[in-house]
Amino acid sequence: MVTSLLHRIRYIAVAALLGATVTACTTVAETGRTQFNFMSDRQANQMGLGAYQQIKKEKKISRNTELAKQVRQVGNRVAKASGRNYAWEFTLFEDENPNAFALPGGKVGVNTGLFKVAKNRDQLAAVMAHEVAHATSRHSAERVSGQTGVQAILVGAGAAMGASQNTMNLFAQAATLGVILPFNRSQESEADYIGLLFMARAGYDPRQAVELWKNFANYGGNRPPEFLSTHPSPGNRIQKLQANMPAAMREYQNSPYRK
């Protein structure tokens, strides 16, 4: 009974999602991928700025002036190479977790812990370029659009079918695994590819992106299974980066920053 109802809700939800997609499609310039995105740049950038200001209030900004300067210098150079005229801002946070994040409108945060795995400026550039690529590809707005669309469609489809709350919860979990997470892994792979090109255009050696992810793999730690993660595994990332390296090396050889 539940399985049958879930199938019926799924058909309604998919039909509604397809209809919405037709009216809210944009394209990622560097890859040509069509994305579902109904947020304007102004809306997304306001959302990013508000979130960034809140994060800066809640997280400790690092007082390590040398590392903060590196983050700003490398980030701004990569951002310039991307060709996107955002109000770029790069902040170093005091956090031992080796991570970074990007918000709409060019707001990028880097944890001090990242320097445990980013051993030189080129490896730092690989991370910065990846985050810049998330921003220029409007991945945050795309993710919000997708999540909002799925939630709205679930409510409408469930109401139309008279589904119980438990059934709706089951379908919401299925939607998360079947739509949201693979979509986010696709964004991560896309940011890896675009970021590789951006760092190369900025005159940073793209081969160091491979070394960076080897460092991440060696750093270890408990990891969830890849099929439940929004991030590809380091091994998977390295393989794809190596496949895209010839194109990145052409950008690197032609970079004006190397002259």
Image: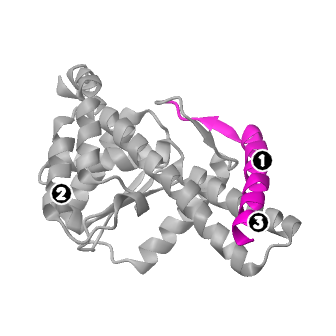
Which of pointers 2 and 1 indicates the residue nearer the eye?
1
Q: Residue at position x 65%, y 54% from top?
A: 145
Residue wearing tag 2: 217
- Indicate the position of residue 120 as horizontal and vertical percent values: 12, 49
Q: Relative to 203, is 70 above or below?
A: below
Give the mark nearer the N terminus: 3 vs 1: 3
Which of pointers 3 and 1 indicates the residue nearer the eye?
3
Q: Amino acid at mark 2?
A: Ala
Residue 93 lies within the magenta run? no
Q: Amino acid at mark 1?
A: Ala
Magenta-colored span: 1-29
Quadrant assignment for the N terminus: bottom right
Q: Residue at position x 40%, y 61% from top?
A: 229
The residue carrying pointer 2 sits among few (fewer than 14), some (14 to 19) or many (20 or more) residues within 10 Å by Cα, namely some
- Indicate the position of residue 219 as horizontal and vertical percent values: 15, 64
Residue at far front of view: 1
Judging depth in this view, the residue of 160 and 238 nearest the camera is 160
Q: Residue at position x 65%, y 50% from top?
A: 42
Give the mark nearer the N terminus: 2 vs 1: 1
Judging depth in this view, the residue of 169 and 250 nearest the camera is 169
Q: Secondary structure at mark 3?
A: helix
Q: Amino acid at mark 3?
A: Leu
With 70 as the anchor, is 91 left or right in this view? right
Residue 5 tag number: 3
The residues tagged by marks 3 and 1 sit, at their Cα atoms, a distance apart of 16 Å
The residues tagged by marks 2 and 3 sit, at their Cα atoms, a distance apart of 43 Å
Residue wearing tag 1: 15
**Quarter occupied by residue 158:** bottom right
Quadrant assignment for the C terminus: top left
